[in-house]
Amino acid sequence: MTPLLRALGVGKRFGGLAALSEVRFDIPEGSIYGLIGPNGAGKTTLFNLLTGIYTPDEGHFEFGGAPLPGKPHDVCARGIARTFQNIRLFGSMTALENVMVGRHVRTRAGLFGAIFHPAGERDEEAAIRARALELLDFVGIAHRADQVSRQLSYGDQRRLEIARALATEPRLLALDEPAAGMNATETATLGTLLQKIRATGVTVLLIEHDVKLVMGMCDRVAVLEYGRLIAEGPPEQVQRDPRVIEAYLGAETTA
């Protein structure tokens, strides 16, 4: 499959600490790609570099065959959306309003429209609302549309974050530990949702500590340790790699 995203020697330093060094991988379009490793391995740093929160000190990313821009808004406009390890919803807004916010990168209305509400702006607002309701239904929480987001269950808040990210119309959806804090039933539901997302043509990049979820769902898996890529390939190959067993999987199975 054609690579949608390429990491080409990406590195990042914080003072004298190399958080990432010479990271290289290709993510095929239409795949679910896993990124695993111990705490502090550099996984979230890589997400922050990918989405423009940090600037690489070395190397770069290519997306759709062209270098990525450096600002988060421009990265999102190019077609990369993400969620965060810690839930970041607008707690006083409803689930529907949270998803509608996600559409801002695809809207055309400016200051004039916001003040005077011409017909074009009203039509666009109606379309945004309709799409947001579709996405809430897609992730399974349409019945929570009018509920304030901070009152949702933990699992529903996670699904709401994914719906908001999908509202940006991404080609690549980057999820930072979406199953964290979920029980077995919620994790299974999440797995089904990720397969649905892939079926729509969206490529998924997944950071996750649930090894069973990653190995059972991902087409390819990359493993980071101390900021370096120590293995990359199909799940069955990565699971047998002695370096991965020593650095990560062994610790997981004995925990």
Image: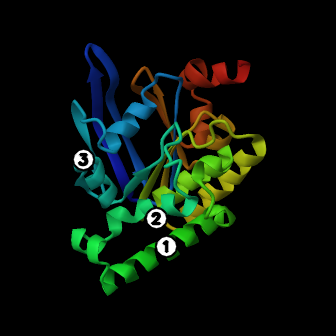
> Please, is residue 102 above or below residue 221 in the view?
below
> Please, is residue 125 above or below residue 28 in the view?
below
Q: Residue furthest right?
A: 185
How many numbered dots are placed on residues in this image?
A: 3
Q: Which residue is mark 2?
A: 100
Question: Of label 3 and label 1, which has the lower sequence position?
Answer: 3
> Are the two marked residues, 2 and 1, in contact with CB atoms closer than 8 angstroms?
yes
Residue 251 position, x and y percent, is 64, 19
Residue 30 position, x and y percent, is 48, 60
Which quadrant holds residue 245?
top right
Q: Nearer the viewer, residue 11 or 166?
A: 166
In which quadrant is the N terminus drawn? bottom left
Q: Which residue is mark 1?
A: 129
Which quadrant holds residue 249?
top right
Q: Residues within 10 Å of mark 1 (few under 14, many from 20)?
A: some
Residue placed at 40% from the left, 39% from the top?
A: 47
Q: Which residue is mark 3?
A: 71
Q: Nearer the viewer, residue 77 or 249?
A: 77
Which quadrant holds residue 102?
bottom left
- Residue type (three-letter) at the residue carrying disc 1: Arg
Q: CA distance from mark 3 to mark 1?
A: 27 Å
Residue placed at 43% from the left, 33% from the top?
A: 44
Please tell me whether mark 3 or mark 1 is closer to you in this view: 1
Q: CA distance from mark 2 to mark 1?
A: 6 Å
Q: Residues within 10 Å of mark 3 (few under 14, many from 20)?
A: some
